[in-house]
Amino acid sequence: MIDTATNTVIATIALPADANPWGVAVSPDSSRVYVTGYGSNTVYVINAATNMVIGSVVVGSGPQGIAIATTVSIPPSSAPGKVTGGGFIQPDGTISPGMVLIQSGTNATIGDKATFGFVVQYNAGAVSPSGNLTYNDHGLNITIKAISINLLLISSGPCGANKHAKFTGSANVSGPTRTSSTQSFSVDADDCSSSGSGPDLFSISTVGAIPYAAAGPVVDGSIQIHKN
């Protein structure tokens, strides 16, 4: 970080080793600094008051220049906390809102299990959340395995305060023919059983060469959400 009045370096901000920082832009209110990571395909969000990285956004390949419009929508920052879950959803039509579908409308997994397991954690001051996700739709032979996680949000949901979590990132998605591709994914999870308000809820979706969406109550297993 450079003091523009004296042209002296006043702080050094650590980015991932593969970031290869390239372009820099400052928000209109000077509260945020945005840095493109050419090597990591990511834009990093820095709090100008604390000189700390508070968020990151995965973008296209090799971002270079960056500019900010007069009206800026600041991307959400991850919430410190931990989310864990494991079990399966069973879209057999007997449990509402049980559903598994391919976005084309084909619902080919009625009666089969879709198993999942994940651990996602974000510590204050970290560049991004850490953790893992594995999902397997046994009926459609589709597997989703997280490569990276870029956002963890913990908020109120249908089962109470701080009982809903959302995390996003990129994943290796393998389709019915075992062809695989890297795609964006999003997971929503609700910890309902701990408050006695019903079964835990899980949903997942991907966007890319193999678009996919699944949702339903957790039949066997649990989801736990802890906000720091």
Image (tube, grey):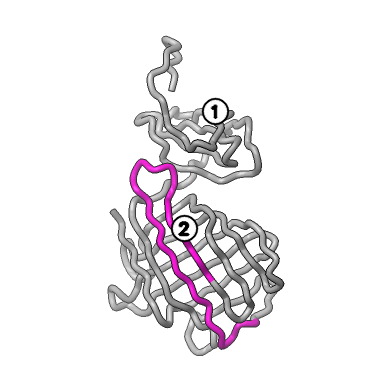
Given the current orientation, which residue lies at the most extreme top position? 6
Q: Secondary structure at mark 2?
A: strand
Query: Residue visible at 60% across and 63% down?
Result: 206
Is 129 inside the magenta-drawn segment?
Answer: yes
**Residue type at numbered disc 2:** Phe
Where residue 63 appears, x then y in whole percent?
Answer: 63, 36
Where residue 76 appears, x then y in whole percent?
Answer: 45, 47
Where residue 90 appears, x then y in whole percent?
Answer: 51, 83
Query: Residue visible at 68% across and 73% down?
Result: 176
Figure quadrant of residue 209: bottom right
Where residue 65 appears, x then y in whole percent?
Answer: 63, 30
Answer above or below: position of 98 versus 61: below
**Residue type at numbered disc 1:** Val
> Local crowd at mark 2 within 10 Å, few (<14), some, or many (≥20)?
many
Write down the residue under mark 2.
Answer: 167
Q: Secondary structure at mark 1?
A: strand
Number of numbered discs overlaid on the protein picture: 2
Specify start and end residues of the magenta stretch as a single range. Answer: 108-135
Answer above or below: position of 6 versus 157: above
Cα separation, mark 2 vs mark 1, equals: 26 Å
Q: Nearer the viewer, residue 7 or 149?
A: 149
Q: Earlier in the sequence, mark 2 or mark 1?
A: 1
Q: Nearer the viewer, residue 87 or 1?
A: 87
Figure quadrant of residue 224: bottom left
Q: Nearer the viewer, residue 68 or 154?
A: 154
Figure quadrant of residue 141: bottom right
Write down the residue under mark 1.
Answer: 24
